[in-house]
Amino acid sequence: MACTTSILRFLAFILNFINFIFSVLVACSCLYSIAVFNRSGIITVPCIIGLLLSIILAFNAALGYFIVYQNSTRLIWTYLSLMTLLMVAQIVAIFFASIEFKNLADEIVSNAWHAQIVDSSIITSYEIEFECCGKFGPTDYSDYGQEIPISCYANGNSTGTSDYFTNGCLEKITDLYDIGESLETISNWILIGLEGTSALVHDIFAITQANQKRRKNFY
């Protein structure tokens, strides 16, 4: 029984440490996204929700450390309740409050494209970085009566009349954000799995501790 308790205590420490690190990473990611996309409601609301959940997770992980370190089973129900609420909240957030990356890509590229009439630096940086041209393609410029800029040409060389990028920046950035959306979904479900495992380990730990106390009282 002592060996079982030691294993459970070790697992609880490891899981709480992972949850705490995960919560810090999520919080930093949310703060960074809010700072970079501070004018976008598409990303601000989900990030605020993610930030609040990560703070609660960090607090609960610290509480889990205290419970295991002090062998305190009285607080276990608080820990389990918070962890259950976190799992439910994150599942709800995945389906109803996740970042719409396709809409975010459209908003970013559209803003950059409309701003290029006054300041073309943003759309130019996208064209160079993602090897794209315009919002939907090179015809965007001809439709506006503009020449295709050098940033649309491979290696910044416009000597070849047809040596320019044919894909629009919206397509390229949407493809990139699709990867980000997949990674976010995977990380969310991994975190939910960690929280569920942590709750289970702490529950078994509390039951084990209670059984040990009963045996001591009996003998």
Image (spheres, grey):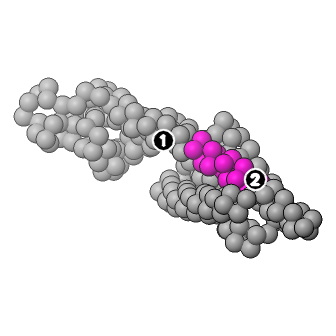
Which corner quadrant of the image does residue 162 belong to?
Answer: top left
Q: Nearer the viewer, residue 176 or 77?
A: 77
Q: Secondary structure at mark 2?
A: helix
Q: Nearer the viewer, residue 207 or 111?
A: 207
User: Farthest residue toward the front?
Assistant: 219
- Residues in magenta? 189-204
67 to the left or right of 138: right
Q: Identity of the amino acid at label 2?
A: Ile
In this figure, which residue is indicated by the disc labeled 2? Answer: 204
Q: Mark 2 and mark 1: span between their CA atoms?
A: 32 Å
- Label 2 or label 1, whichever lies nearer to me, is 2
Tell me if residue 198 is in the magenta stretch. yes
Dot 1 crowding, Cα within 10 Å, few <14, some 14–19, many 20+:
few
In this figure, which residue is indicated by the disc labeled 1? Answer: 183
User: Farthest residue toward the right?
Assistant: 218
Does residue 56 appear in the picture of this structure? no
53 to the left or right of 175: right
